[in-house]
């Protein structure tokens, strides 16, 4: 059947006309929109919300997310997004993740963003993974008759009337909604020490040596073949002064200590084991790339090491959803992480700020933890292709590193990147990229061994 049974019956009973548009079978609504060839601005979608009084559907533009404060003000209710699993149970005649934005067909009360009511034409899912339906503005308004209209959208493309949500606004909402982990005490001490221009290698070593586990990991790192130091290393201070340098030791220690804020399982493509492997490879590559771009190698290393902390925060705050995301990642390696995150957290854009993706969430956490601005930007924007703005080179370095790692099956997603374009934006030619790739292959064994030691 091309249209979900309840939707088809509702539209026929109301005499509402529409046209069907077949698309290739896809994994989620995002992929269907892309496959359609139409502008995303023509699509509408549903976000499903719930409280003790029942379910409500919010209908809004595909490229937008809801302002939950505005929803509360409009309804007087503290609604929360349904998970993908709950939504799928409610829409039993639909393929998972393809709930049509016509609540009347399912006896669900509807809130509609005021912008949607002015659409001259709208495209939407029909309830399955291979067909879209299109309605003109009149038919759309008939299908949404009885809905409660209002200004619901907080996020999306900026317009003359409405700006896209800023990082500060998302951070404010994130802090209001969820209990965020503080930076671990040792990580905070290391961060404060690095801010002191008069700090010495001895002070850093003494701070690290208070923690036997961290001491062992720093020593193992310094003795690795990555640095090929010919002599003996018997203390953290020697690791700092003879091999690694102050900044690199501080950044490695900061990353190791900071991870302790999160309770995340080790297993799976998004688990702690794979996190450390991805992070170490990315940090190693960012450092190599920075040396070719005349950027700060130590800072680039830290950007690569910490860029994926948003995944850890999602796993820490939402263990059941993280497990579902982990399962989807295993089953759909070709799909972007952002699409999978949207599917898990409300089938598109529903779970308030979580719909911005783990990159932005990580950037927010880094900002709250007062990490350096390039680290914040690299984490926050590494999922955003075509980024232009502050600390652009550090974002591009992380993106290029991830693109090179995808080719080797390392990381949290494997949809291909335009590696030549990323390299070109950093002023790197084919020979430089090939040399960086050779570095990965040469040091793979040592990086894998280090990742295992850090995740245990």
Image (cartoon, helix red, strand yellow):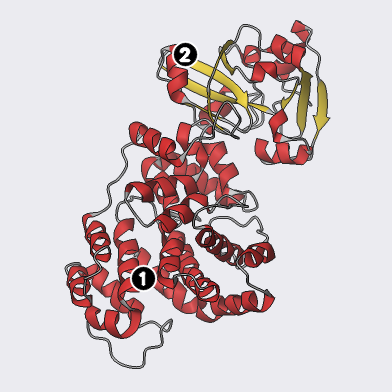
Q: Is residue 346 above or below residue 191?
A: above
Q: Is residue 183 left or right of residue 372?
A: left
x, y percent for residue 403:
60, 63
Q: Which residue is mark 1?
A: 453
x, y percent for residue 412:
53, 56
Task: Locate the C terminus by quadrant.
Answer: bottom left
In the image, what residue occupies the spot 33% across and 57% down? 259
Task: Determine the secondary structure under disc 1.
Answer: helix
Q: Is residue 28 above or below residue 135?
A: below
Q: Is residue 356 above or below residue 51?
A: below
Local crowd size for mark 2, using a 10 Å CA cut-off: few (<14), some (14–19), many (≥20)? some
Q: Is residue 9 left or right of residue 333?
A: right
Separation of residues labelled 1 and 2 (CA atoms): 52 Å
x, y percent for residue 196:
24, 65
Which label belongs to residue 74? 2
Local crowd size for mark 1, using a 10 Å CA cut-off: few (<14), some (14–19), many (≥20)? some
Residue 28 in view of the camera: no
**Mark whose residue sits in front, 1 or 2:** 2
Which label belongs to residue 323? none
Of the two numbered discs 1 and 2 on the same chain, state the one appearing first in sequence.
Answer: 2
Image marks 1 and 2: residues in contact by CB distance under 8 Å: no
Residue 252 in view of the camera: yes
x, y percent for residue 153:
54, 25
In the image, what residue occupies the spot 43% across and 23% down? 69
* Residue 31 figure quarter: top right
In the image, what residue occupies the spot 41% across and 12% down? 76
Task: Locate the N terminus by quadrant.
Answer: top right
Q: Nearer the viewer, residue 441 or 113?
A: 113
In the image, what residue occupies the spot 34% across and 79% down? 244
* Residue 170 figure quarter: top left
Task: Determine the secondary structure under disc 2.
Answer: helix
């Amino acid at each position: 059947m091309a249209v979900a049974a309840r939707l088809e019956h509702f539209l026929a009973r109301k005499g509402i006309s529409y046209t069907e548009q077949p698309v290739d079978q896809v994994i989620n609504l995002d992929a269907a929109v892309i496959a359609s060839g139409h502008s995303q601005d023509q699509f509408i979608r549903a976000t499903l919300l719930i409280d003790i009084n029942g379910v409500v559907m919010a209908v809004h533009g595909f490229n937008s997310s809801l302002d939950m404060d505005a929803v509360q003000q409009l309804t007087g209710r503290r609604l929360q997004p349904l998970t993908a699993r709950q939504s799928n149970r409610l829409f039993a005649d639909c393929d998972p993740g393809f709930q049509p934005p016509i609540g009347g067909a399912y006896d669900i009360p509807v809130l509609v963003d005021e912008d949607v009511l002015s659409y001259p034409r709208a495209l939407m899912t029909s309830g399955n993974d291979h067909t879209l339906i299109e309605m003109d503005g009149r038919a759309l308004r008939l299908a949404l008759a009885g809905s409660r209209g209002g200004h619901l959208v907080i996020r999306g493309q900026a317009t003359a009337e409405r700006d896209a949500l800023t990082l500060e606004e998302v951070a404010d909402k994130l802090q209001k909604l969820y209990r965020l982990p503080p930076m671990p005490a040792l990580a905070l001490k290391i961060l404060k020490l690095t801010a002191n221009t008069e700090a010495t290698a001895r002070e850093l070593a003494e701070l690290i040596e208070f923690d036997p586990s961290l001491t062992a990991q720093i020593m193992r790192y310094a003795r690795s073949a990555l640095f090929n130091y010919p002599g003996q290393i018997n203390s953290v201070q020697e690791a700092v002064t003879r091999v690694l340098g102050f900044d690199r030791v501080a950044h490695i220690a900061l990353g190791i200590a900071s991870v302790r804020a999160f309770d995340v399982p080790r297993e799976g493509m998004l688990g702690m084991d794979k996190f450390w492997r991805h992070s170490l490879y990315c940090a190693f590559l960012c450092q190599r790339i920075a040396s070719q771009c005349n950027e700060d190698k130590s800072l680039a290393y830290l950007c690569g090491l910490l860029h994926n902390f948003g995944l850890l925060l999602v796993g820490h705050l939402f263990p059941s959803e993280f497990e579902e995301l982990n399962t989807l990642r295993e089953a759909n390696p070709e799909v972007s992480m952002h699409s999978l995150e949207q599917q898990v957290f409300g089938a598109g854009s529903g779970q308030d700020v979580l719909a911005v993706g783990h990159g932005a969430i990580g950037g927010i956490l880094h900002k709250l933890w007062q990490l350096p601005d390039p680290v914040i930007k690299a984490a926050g924007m590494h999922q955003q292709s075509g980024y232009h703005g502050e600390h652009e080179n550090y974002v591009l370095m992380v993106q290029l590193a991830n693109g090179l790692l995808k080719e080797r099956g390392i990381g949290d997603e494997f949809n291909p990147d335009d590696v030549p374009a990323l390299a070109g934006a950093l002023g790197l030619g084919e020979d430089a990229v090939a040399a960086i790739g050779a570095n990965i292959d040469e040091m793979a064994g040592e990086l894998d061994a280090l990742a295992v030691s850090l995740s245990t």
